[in-house]
Amino acid sequence: MNFNWVISGDTNPTIKKVCIDLEYRLRPRITKFLLSRLDSECFGDFSSFHFDVDIKNQWVWISEKTPQGYIDKIKTDFDNEINGSALFSVA
């Protein structure tokens, strides 16, 4: 699983800390989500999944780098499950 951080402006130590903290919260949540939908297909290997994380707009989306077949299978529930939470509230 790979994260692409969408950051406008300079990356200062505070922004870097926010990214690290957010990744620690996102990774288990997204892993759980993917396991519940694709475990029988991926067998726990989510290395082909890429996510874009927009810090300013507080949004996570599935990157186009993710294989289209996987995107089609998870896109319907992804926003509700992942973006419908308070992941950004501490930032």
Image (cartoon, rainbow, N blue to C red):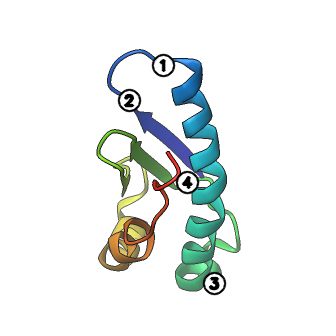
- Mark 1 and mark 3 lie on one chain; the one further toward the N terminus is 1
**Residue pointed to by mark 1:** 11
- Mark 4 and mark 3 lie on one chain; the one further toward the N terminus is 3
Element class at badge 4: loop
Q: Position of residue 59 (x, y in %)?
A: 34, 53
The reply to whether the C-beta atoms of the residues labelled 4 and 2 are less than 8 Å apart is no
Element class at badge 2: loop
Distance from disc 1 to disc 3, alpha carbons, whole Å, reads: 38 Å
Q: Is residue 81 above or below residue 68?
A: below
The three-letter code of the residue at mark 1 reads Thr
Distance from disc 1 to disc 4, alpha carbons, whole Å, reads: 26 Å
In front of the other: 84 or 31: 84
**Residue pointed to by mark 3:** 40
Q: State the residue at coordinates (38%, 29%).
A: 7
Distance from disc 1 to disc 2, alpha carbons, whole Å, reads: 7 Å
The three-letter code of the residue at mark 3 reads Ser
Question: Tag 1: Cα neighbours inside 10 Å, few (<14), some, or many (≥20)?
Answer: few
Which circle marks residue 46 in the picture? Answer: none
Q: Position of residue 45 (x, y in %)?
A: 68, 63
